[in-house]
Image: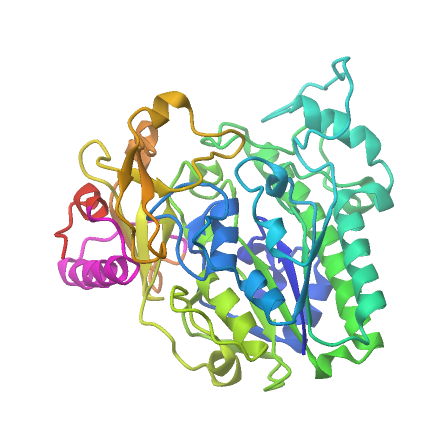
Amino acid sequence: MKAIMVMYDSLNRHMLPNYGCDWTLAPNFRRLGERAVTFDNHYVGSMPCMPARRELHTGRHNFLHRSWGPFEPFDDSTFTILKENGIYTHLVSDHYHYWEDGGATYHHRYSSWVNVRGQEGDAWKGEVADPEVPAHHGRINRQDWINRKYMREEERTPQAQTFAAGLEFLETNREQDNWYLQIETFDPHEPFFTLKQWKDRYNYDWDGPHFDWPKYERVTEDPDAVEYLRYQYAALLTQCDHYLGKVIDCMDAHAMWQDTMLLVVTDHGFLLGEHDWWGKARMPWYNETAHIPFFVWDPRSSTANTRRRSLTTTIDVGPTILDYFGLVPPPNMDGFALRDTVASDAKVRDATIYGMFGAHVNITDGRHVYMRGPVGDNAPLNHYTLMPTHMRSPFSTRELANMQWHEPLPFTKGCPVMRIPSPGMGRFAETFRTQLFDLAADPGQTNPIEDAAVEARMVAHLEDALFRNLAPREQYQRLGLAAP
């Protein structure tokens, strides 16, 4: 048995032809839809980047107990379990957060890994002199502007190198058995840097300032700039599509479809001006960011060129991979193996929960989305962790001064944990008011509804999900709900 997962960061469902977009150039995603099952109701779990990756490893939600951070000592990892059962696991990635303080334990779960350098602000090339930067909208990052000088040819771009290394693994090991390959690119995450050959596919006329990296803020640019940035994203998406095609070509050339699972996933989407926002994280998780693409080819059922409506989520990916290799997910994994869902659209849940630490706690049943915001001052809120690390630094001594030891949680295998108070997203509290949306009547989530019966039903789903996911009692208090 063999498996390949191609993972993107910030891959927008609504920009793919598989989900109705009629202007982006992505023929290989169309090919993928013909070769695999396309999921229509797949949602994020914990946001953003590294919390989502923790969910791929652990099959359980992260955001109710801590924010961005590393793999915990008590966590079960899908990829360690594979490795311990004789399945060779290999990660190829240019996602530089893996090598920062807040993600530096994940890649060690694999048998081997390749680190491709240079994305975004990766502290890669050393130049003392400041680079010359153009007039611009949005963000400019000093290190990013230096890194770009070293990737002026296609083969030197991080995405090209990532897929080249992944294809090298396939060519070397395709005749071997019992392996898992994860080809993971940071693209099409911002900044939307790509070369002229991809931009020219769209030929969008623009004479304004440099703009390929929006701030996570309200849109203040004029409509032409908004349209231009969407074309910048589309150009990078087309590059992503090109390298996806190389994986499909390799599977075709070597008849790998008979014994190789293929999953194509992302962690979340990205707002490109929708709802008057750029980005993610400091605004509500609208469906542009929360409702994500998901494709699966499973040679056990050989089901292809069809769609599935069942509600699925990121925590299902790990159990699905383990089940494919004949392994039983451990008890602490809350996700579901999707073998029967791929084969026959078997239902695995009535609703799914998602969100980001300290912000909304969201629930959807596929028809409605309920965004439950905090009441009062967004407190109490605590991190529960043995790895007190933010994205790029350990927790500060000021944060740790109020740390208390807490008794073991049900999933920490008898380990007590640190309980560290957090302010959460308090400074953005105005954007996290409670809202209810009817996706059938309002797929764009532009008009929140008031319906007491629907809200009561969604609150019941939310309370059930909080209970099943072992949410700390203060989460109920923070959200104005009755704790069980």
Taking the image as shown, residue 446 lies to the left or right of residue 474, namely right
Estimate the x, y position of residue 355 in percent, counting from the top left.
37, 49
Taking the image as shown, residue 311 lies to the left or right of residue 226, namely left
Q: Is residue 330 above or below residue 420?
A: below
The answer to which image quadrant residue 213 occupies is top right
Rendered residue at 77%/55% (across/down): 163
Rendered residue at 70%/71% (across/down): 31
Estimate the x, y position of residue 275 in percent, counting from the top left.
42, 42
Which one is in front, 214 or 311?
Answer: 311
The image's colour scheme reads: rainbow
The answer to which image quadrant residue 346 occupies is bottom left
Q: Which secondary structure class fits the magenta region best?
A: helix
Can you see residue 20?
A: no
Estimate the x, y position of residue 81 in percent, counting from the top left.
55, 66
Taking the image as shown, residue 483 lies to the left or right of residue 117, namely left
Taking the image as shown, residue 285 lies to the left or right of residue 109, namely left
Start and end of the magenta stretch? Answer: 444-473
- Residue 264 lies in the magenta stretch: no
Which residue occupies the extreme front position in the image? 414
Which one is in front, 197 or 269?
Answer: 269
Estimate the x, y position of residue 344 in percent, counting from the top left.
48, 85
The answer to which image quadrant residue 406 occupies is top left
Image quadrant in which the C terminus is located? bottom left
Rendered residue at 60%/40% (across/down): 97
Image quadrant in which the N terminus is located? bottom right
Q: Is residue 360 above or below residue 88?
A: above
Rendered residue at 40%/51% (across/down): 62
Q: How many marks?
A: 0
- Residue 466 lies in the magenta stretch: yes
Can you see residue 329?
A: yes
